[in-house]
């Protein structure tokens, strides 16, 4: 049972990162509107692959909720029926949630796969919650944290729908991101508590504090990053998806802060290396952390100077969350070590 719990903890961590990666790809490819409705897609559980499936034809069975594109407008069938020889408007209603009537199979399937991975993520944390019940007597915190993960993932799904439906709250992307970090930290914490990790004998408070500081800096940087992203989203609406060279023509102060803050992050993490070496703590994680920060900076510079090259946006986002995960894992390992040595 414990083995299964550990398996589902690792699987959930992996799937959460997969959700973040595919979410980034949805945005990069502009596939957000690939499915006009939710949870179905054009009224189908498995979305169409061909425009023919969204075209009215005679003698065809249409189910309630299924859509067609008719005269460049989305129409949704009011009931189950078989079409006659002529198009009958009475069987259809206008779909007004979006004024979007283009079928792009790539957008539809990217969005659909993203949704599927979201569902798989939900199932994975539900299974985790189930296996966590075994710890209720001896380690109730594990059970409670697993349940908290289910609530947090549920909240994420709800927030995702609100963001798509309303486009209202300017801070929704930031909240969404902070919740993702919360889910990652709970899962990593559970994983560490139940895994067989090497117990070092480090008694360095300065290292512990500086690692905590680096973690807090990363969270701040991620929050600032989401604000930069909201700015870019506004630019995309105003200037257009294709004119990437104009998105950062006027540099907002939030971008300048984001850019400069990364140097502070780099410095603090070099200090972490310095302190670890001083006390002979050989952890490869620190080098991974520095490597990811370096790639983040390179990607940031590329987005600015090379006008958002292919994949730079989703990679920048994914690596930021991986950076957070590694730093959190490193912090938890040091925090626990100190406890053990007390
Ligand atoms: C430690 C270093 C860095 C971290 C952890 C980081 C993190 C982030 C995060 C989390 C986002 C939001 C992504 C999203 O919501 O899709 C973001 C956006 C952004 N960052 Fe960074 N960043 C770093 C360094 C930099 C640097 C040095 C630059 C520029 C020189 C930069 C430029 C940008 C830009 C242009 C965006 C908007 C991207 C988009 O629209 O998808 N970043 N950053």
Image (cartoon, rainbow, N blue to C red):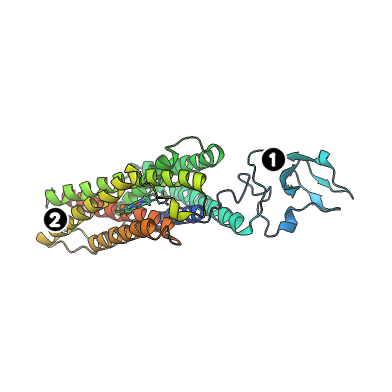
| Residue at the spot 44% in from the left edge and 37% down from the top edge | 170
Q: Nearer the viewer, residue 256 or 110?
A: 256
Q: Nearer the viewer, residue 214 or 307?
A: 307
* Label 1 secondary element: loop
Would you say the residues marked 2 and 1 are in contact, meaning their CB atoms lie under 8 Å apart? no
Q: CA distance from mark 2 to mark 1?
A: 62 Å
Give the side of residue 216 with respect to residue 227, left or right.
Answer: left
In front: label 2 or label 1: 1
Q: Compared to 73, does 24 lie above or below?
A: below
Q: Position of residue 333 (x, y in %)?
A: 23, 54
Residue 278, quarter of the rendered image: bottom left
| Residue at the spot 67% in from the left edge and 38% down from the top edge | 96
Q: Position of residue 322 (x, y in %)?
A: 35, 56
Of mark 2 and mark 1, the one earlier in the sequence is 1
Within 10 Å of disc 1 (Cα), the crowding (few <14, some 14-19, many 20+) is some
* Label 2 secondary element: loop
Residue under label 2, please give it: 202
Give the side of residue 26 with respect to residue 145, left or right.
Answer: right
Establish whether ligand 1 lies closer than 8 Å to the Cβ of label 2.
no
Is residue 78 visible in the rendered image? The answer is no
Give the side of residue 54 with respect to residue 197, left or right.
Answer: right
Is residue 292 visible in the rendered image? The answer is yes
| Residue at the spot 69% in from the left edge and 47% down from the top edge | 43
- Residue 267 got which mark? none
How many numbered marks have been drawn onto this rendered protein structure? 2
Give the side of residue 228 with respect to residue 94, left or right.
Answer: left
Residue that protrudes farthest toward the left in the picture: 278
Residue under label 1, please give it: 95
């Amino acid at each position: 049972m414990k083995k299964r719990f550990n398996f589902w903890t690792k699987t959930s961590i992996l799937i959460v990162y997969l959700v973040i990666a595919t979410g980034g790809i949805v945005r990069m490819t502009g596939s957000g509107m690939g499915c006009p409705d939710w949870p179905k897609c054009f009224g189908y559980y498995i979305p169409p692959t061909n425009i023919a499936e969204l075209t009215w034809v005679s003698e065809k069975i249409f189910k309630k909720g299924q859509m067609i594109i008719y005269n460049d407008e989305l129409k949704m069938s009011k009931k189950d029926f078989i079409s006659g020889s002529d198009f009958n408007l009475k069987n259809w209603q206008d779909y007004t949630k979006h004024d979007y009537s283009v079928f792009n199979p790539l957008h539809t399937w990217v969005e659909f796969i993203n949704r599927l991975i979201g569902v798989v993520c939900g199932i994975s944390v539900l299974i985790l919650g189930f296996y966590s019940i075994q710890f209720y007597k001896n380690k109730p915190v594990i059970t409670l944290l697993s349940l908290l993960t289910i609530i947090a993932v549920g909240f994420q799904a709800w927030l995702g729908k609100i963001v798509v439906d309303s486009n209202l709250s300017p801070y929704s992307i930031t909240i969404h991101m902070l919740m993702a970090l919360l889910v990652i930290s709970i899962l990593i914490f559970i994983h560490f508590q139940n895994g067989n990790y090497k117990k070092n004998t480090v008694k360095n408070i300065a290292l512990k504090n500086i690692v905590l500081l680096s973690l807090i800096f990363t969270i701040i940087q991620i929050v600032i990053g989401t604000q930069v992203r909201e700015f870019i989203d506004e630019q995309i609406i105003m200037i257009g998806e294709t004119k990437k060279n104009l998105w950062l023509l006027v540099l907002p102060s939030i971008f300048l802060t984001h850019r400069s803050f990364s140097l502070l992050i780099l410095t603090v993490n070099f200090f972490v290396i310095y302190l670890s070496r001083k006390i002979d703590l050989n952890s490869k994680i620190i080098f991974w952390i520095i490597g990811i920060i370096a790639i983040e900076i390179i990607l940031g510079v590329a987005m600015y100077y090379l006008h958002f090259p292919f994949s730079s946006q989703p990679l920048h986002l994914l690596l930021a969350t991986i950076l957070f995960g590694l730093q959190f894992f490193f912090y938890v390992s040091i925090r626990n070590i100190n406890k053990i040595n007390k």
